[in-house]
Image (cartoon, rainbow, N blue to C red):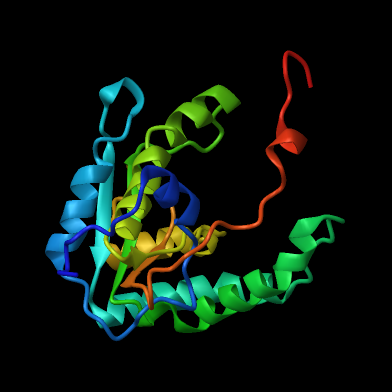
Amino acid sequence: MTPSSPLNLTVDELLTTTRSVRKRLDFDRPVPREVIMECLELALQAPTGSNAQGWQFVFVEDAEKKKALADIYRTFGTPYLDFPPPERGDIRDEQIGAVTNSAKYLNENFEKAPVLMIPCLEGRAEGASAGMSASFWGSLLPATWSFMLALRSRGLGSAWTTLHMMDDGEKKAAEILGIPFDRYTQGGLFPIAYTKGTDFKPAKRLPAEQLTHWNTW
């Protein structure tokens, strides 16, 4: 497989095997910029409110800046991940140990990813109504998820994390990267790397019937 050659995945396989990848990120294999740009070009076809296209994507390769962002993440991630998760009484309880373990691994190794990415959207949604907040994030999240799908289709992986944005973390990250904090909101912090193997499987999820309502709750 050449660096930009897509995997031979059906649409259903792509949708059901795009995982949050942490332990299987290959920290030693470089990620060419042209591959990232291919994925971003695909992601920019996602819908955006009023066709505003107010998004910006910051990619970080610089080792010192990656370390600084990882330190911000760990400031909030370490205590959060040490906090006991809630018991839900269903299949999610069986998976929480593995999820927590992999999240702690990423927390400890975040800066080792070849590239970090922060998607940004013009404006800030603090104090917005539910409708305005939904509209705001609906103008960024589809493109960001499309980017993750495009990564998967080319043998790369990522994980959608937001812990670096807690308290003053987002502002500190903005200062490190020169993001105009008063004009752009960050949507997460994403490690980007090729994956160790490409044989990901569908996750165990709650059945659709348990989450479905017709005409009333």
Position above or below: 106 against 205: below
Position above or below: 24 against 157: below
Q: Residue furthest right?
A: 89
Query: Does 112 sit left or right of 37 as displayed?
Result: right
Q: Residue furthest bottom?
A: 28
Q: Is residue 196 visible?
A: yes
Position above or below: 40 against 100: above
x 12%, y 62%: residue: 34
The foreground one among 8 and 37 is: 8
Query: Does 145 sit left or right of 45 as displayed?
Result: right
Quarter-wise, where is residue 33 in the image?
bottom left
x 39%, y 39%: residue: 142
x 31%, y 35%: residue: 46
Query: Does 15 sit left or right of 45 as displayed?
Result: right
The foreground one among 198 and 83 is: 198
Quarter-wise, where is residue 83 in the image?
bottom right
Q: Which quarter shows the C terminus?
A: top right
Quarter-wise, where is residue 43 in the image?
top left
Rendered location of residue 109, percent (x, y): 45, 83
Rendered location of residue 105, percent (x, y): 54, 81
Q: Residue furthest top?
A: 215
Q: Which quarter shows the N terminus?
A: bottom left
Position above or below: 145 against 200: above
Q: Is residue 186 visible?
A: no
Query: Does 149 sit left or right of 200 as displayed?
Result: left
Rendered location of residue 72, percent (x, y): 47, 72
Rendered location of residue 135, percent (x, y): 46, 27
Number of numbered discs present?
0
Q: Residue furthest left?
A: 34
